[in-house]
Image (cartoon, rainbow, N blue to C red):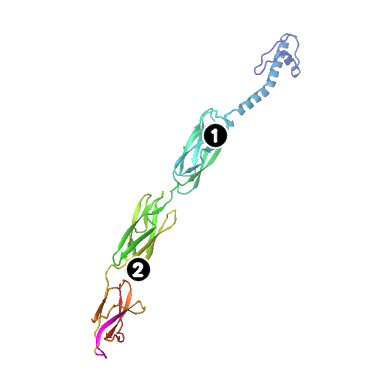
Amino acid sequence: MFLHRIPPFFGRAIAADDALTCNHLLPAYKRGGTGSRQALAVAASVAMLVSMPATMLAQRHHNHGYGSHGQQLSALTCTTGSLTGAGTDACTVTLSQTANSGTTVTLTSSSTAVKVPASVTIASGAATASFTVTASAVTSAQTATLTASDSSNSATYALQLKPASTGAAALTLGSTSVAFGSVSLNTPSTQTVKLTSSGTASLTISAASIKGTGFTMSGVTAPVTLTPGQSATLDLQFDPTAAGADSGTVTISSNSSGGATSTIALSGTGTSTAAYAVDLNWSAPASGSGAVTGYNIYRATSGGAYQVLNASVNSATSYTDTTVKAGTSYTYEVMSVDAAGTQSAPSNVFSATIP
């Protein structure tokens, strides 16, 4: 038998021996001569066609595993995940595998306070691309949802937004107590206290009041706001109207982080610097059992027992008491004395109060 190899149109070369195994698929031809060669050629062609479907199927399966349909968006992440006040954050989109060609990913934000680019492109041969998130300041805590999408998938990320710290207000008093000491009656005395906003936020003094006899204040009218470092001067005055010790309190209400209420203790004593005296005058008795040689003057202090003031018999019908004290009440009586030293009944009572 004359045998030779017939080159196939696709796939591996098929030997004549292989073609002979398929002869039973062909109609019988006359052996020998040209007819035999045609039969072998047809048999080889049939064998080639039978082998083609398996080879082509394997090739399609191989291309499907590495085509563009195998990549998709898998993650969206950011560096910090939380922003306080205005600021930026670096974020990244990630594919499940490297891109066969440039891939566009669209970006959106659920919050108007957070700005993102409209899109970002992942370059061919890369699996990630970065972009910057810009956030403006917010007044309350909130969550902004960032969304990244490609043609087949999407990913989200929750970015936390917090308001910027506003600091703390604080009030520092120049003094927590003011002592006026001794102050003459009806002669006002003034002292000052500095109020300073010593915190990192503005201080608001919402109210200020004063209590105590003879004490007044001015210089600060509530409500008033002091910026950090700013001061105001509180003028305090003590004007006693009566002799004696007095006390008072200034109460200041504010938004100070150290306490809503601050107090200033006040003290002072009213004194009289004027020289007071009580002048007494009376008439001599019209008649008596004996001649009057003089008079004794008696004084009682604030309802106490009477005591004689003169060291010897006072011959005149007048007497000046220079030992009186401010803020004290006195009562006086006068008795006449004869040559034998006998005293008469007391006169009528005279009262005097020293301011």
First to last magenta residue range: 287-298
Q: Position of residue 214 (x, y in %)?
A: 34, 66
Q: Position of residue 275 (x, y in %)?
A: 27, 70
132 horizontally vs 350: left or right = right
Q: Relative to 141, say whether 120 is above or below.
A: above
Q: Position of residue 64 (x, y in %)?
A: 61, 28
Q: Relative to 262, say whether 279 is above or below.
A: below
Foreground mark, 2 or 1, reads: 2
- Which of 128 and 168 lies nearest the eye of the viewer? 168
Give the labeled residue for mark 2.
Answer: 244
Q: Position of residue 295 (x, y in %)?
A: 27, 82
Question: Crowdedness of circle 2 by 10 Å Cα count: few (<14), some, many (20+)?
Answer: some
- Which of 83 and 305 lies nearest the eye of the viewer? 305
Q: What is the CA distance from the residue labelled 2 to the residue labelled 1?
A: 86 Å
The structure residue drawn at horizontal position 30% and vertical position 62%, both measured from the top left corner, is 189
Give the labeled residue for mark 1.
Answer: 94
Report the quarter where the C terminus lies: bottom left
Question: Crowdedness of circle 1 by 10 Å Cα count: few (<14), some, many (20+)?
Answer: many
Query: Of the residues shown, which amino acid type is indicated by label 1?
Result: Thr
Q: Relative to 245, say whether 44 is above or below.
A: above
